[in-house]
Amino acid sequence: MRLQVPALLVLVVMTAAPACASGFDEKIPDQQSIAALEARASQALPREQCFLYAELVHQMTELSLRQYASGDFDKSASLLKQIQTLAHKIHLSVGDDNRRLKGAEILLRHTAFRLTEMLHASSFEDRDLVEQTLAQVSQVQTEAMLQVFRK
């Protein structure tokens, strides 16, 4: 009986972990969904903007990664510059009265991870822009995390 319980636990953990890990990247973002989310974020209440901008940054990062992998470096670089602008908006919207701040922090952490992957795969010419974007996203992720712990 003692051997069956750990085996069952291992089976449950092995099947549940991939389902949790794949949640962020299931949906493939496109320009239309990004534009719709950007319009929604700009018109949202200040309490909702932090999470919506974090979601927008995450989707833009995923699209930028796909464009970079397919060889469309100019579009990828353009998205990275937009991500930097949005990271500044997130910085301005992180405050005491935010809803879903923990969700925003998780999205930003995953986005920073994906940008790190992009940094390792990028060429020397593209590395500076990716590093700047990663630094800004990491900074706002840290700010969001510190705000979550203050609550």
Image (cartoon, grey):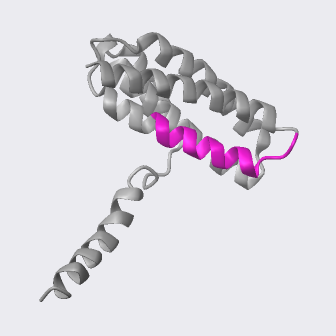
Image point (34%, 73%), residue name: 14
x and y, in percent, of residue 126 in the image: 81, 38
Count how many numbered circles sit on residues in the image. 0
Q: Which quarter of the picture shows residue 95?
A: top left
Residue 83 belongs to the span the image colors magenta: no
Q: Is residue 31 visible?
A: no
Judge by depth and name the residue closer to the eye, 41 or 8: 8
Q: In which quarter of the view is residue 145 placed?
A: top left
Between 150 and 92, the one lying in front of the other is 150
Name the quarter where the N terminus is drawn: bottom left
Q: Is residue 106 above or below residue 24?
A: above
Residue at 64% over, 50% down:
66
54 w.r.t. 114: above or below: above
Secondary structure character of the magenta stretch overall: helix
Q: Position of residue 125 (x, y in %)?
A: 87, 38
The answer to whether 125 appears left or right of 116 in the picture is right
Residue drawn at point x = 43 percent, y = 55 percent: 26
Coordinates of residue 115 in the picture (x, y in percent): 62, 41
- Quarter of the image with the C terminus in it: top left
View extreme (left): residue: 1
- The magenta span reads 108-124
Residue 112 visible here:
yes
Relative horizontal placement of residue 42, taking residue 4 as reference (left or right) = right
**Residue found at the very far front of the displayed protein:** 2
Where residue 9 appears, x then y in whole percent?
Answer: 23, 75
In the displayed structure, 21 sits above or below 7; it is above
